[in-house]
Amino acid sequence: MPPHFDPTLVNDAFGDAGLYVDLVFQKRAILFDLGDRANVSARKLLRVSDIFVTHRHMDHFAGFDSLLRLLIGREKMLSIFGPPGMIDAIEHKLRAYTWNLVEGYDGNLVIRAVDVDADGRMSAALFAGRSRFARADRACAQYEDGLLLQEPDFQMRAATLDHGVPVLAFALEERMEINILRDRVERMGLAVGPWLRRFKEAILREAPDNDLIDVIFQSETAGQVSKLPLGALRREIMKSGPGRKIAYVVDCAFTPENQEKIIDLARNADLFFIEATFLDADASVAAARRHLTARQAGWLARKSNAKRLVTLHYSPRYKGRGDLLADEAQHAFLGH
Ligand SMILES: [Zn+2]
């Protein structure tokens, strides 16, 4: 992966499912699922701006309290997306504590909870420390094509799957990959520096070609700044390509409807994180618990035309034999 997205699994394949994605240039991170977070440092958790919870079985949501403990009293806005019922769940979690002193804290922690329903509606509510986390409902919004979040350099898409309860699956897409050609920068006599980041931001915002960008020439003395048009810089110093894509799918049955939605969501993903909870020999148990087998996971990754497959969320019954699950999935992925 290029350094724009830096994804790491939060636990080993037998631990609670979870994926931490650092958005390297934005000083922020995204978290998929909120189970056991003991393996993620406080420094990393403090970067998290948005959390995407697949569903509220305990192993996907029990980390809320410890995260709240870390964030309380900080100046921060945290968004938590989940299937319907997420707003109520967060309200109940927050009501379990006594907040008579919270108004006096330095920072105002604001939690924005978002219910994502299968019919394209999102409802949100804010809970602010300043008002003792009283619930403030926001107007409903529609979302199209599963698109939950659209930012200048990435977007997040979701699909609702069946696991006995609705479960969200996610795809994170970089809008465009921009590579700066350093040798060209230097050949133009320009110095490599923070102005390149502002240049990239202007490209991502689709600023007009005649916009002037502050640049620094190697020959200039400290503090001196020149200006060059965005279009000329674009032609000279950058190469762009389609953005990278990460898909995250856990806790779902291998039904035809789920299969179709998963293949559609994860299509052409560079990295596909998917549960491989049971061996195919135990497919009947998997079906009864509405989970995927490793072979089914590999097949789905193959059908999605994913480039790489990473399996997670193994059942504890296979402890010590995790490689069997990984191998079975890779085998099906490669079409053997
Ligand atoms: Zn689970």
Image (cartoon, grey):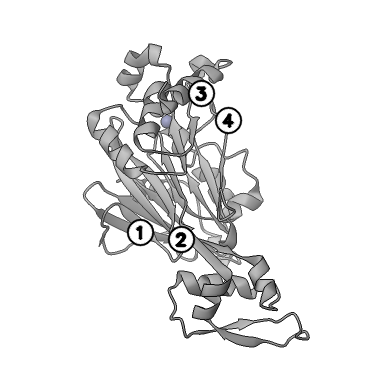
Label 4 within 8 A of ligand 1 by Cβ: no
Foreground disc of the pair 2, 4: 2
Q: Residue at x 44, y 66 (%)?
A: 152
Label 1 within 8 A of ligand 1 by Cβ: no
The residue pinned by badge 2 equals 176
**Circles 4 and 1 in contact, beta carbons < 8 Å:** no
Foreground disc of the pair 4, 1: 4
Q: Dot 3 surroundings within 10 Å: few (below 14), some, or many (20 or more)?
A: many
Mark 1 or 2, nearer chain start: 1
Q: Quadrant of residue 8?
A: top right
Residue 58 in percent (x, y) is at: 44, 33
Q: Dot 4 surroundings within 10 Å: few (below 14), some, or many (20 or more)?
A: few
Mark 4 or 1, nearer chain start: 4
The residue pinned by badge 3 equals 326
The residue pinned by badge 1 equals 125
Residue 174 in percent (x, y) is at: 46, 56
Residue furthest top as drawn? 281
Foreground disc of the pair 2, 3: 2
Mark 2 or 3, nearer chain start: 2
- Give 156 or 196, whichever is nearer the viewer: 196
**Residue 142 is at least partly visible in this image:** yes
Check the image and report above or below for 47 versus 216: above
- Give 8 or 53, whichever is nearer the viewer: 8
Q: Dot 2 surroundings within 10 Å: few (below 14), some, or many (20 or more)?
A: some
Locate the C terminus and report the quarter of the image it occupies: top left
Residue type of the residue flagged with mark 1: Ala
Mark 3 or 1, nearer chain start: 1
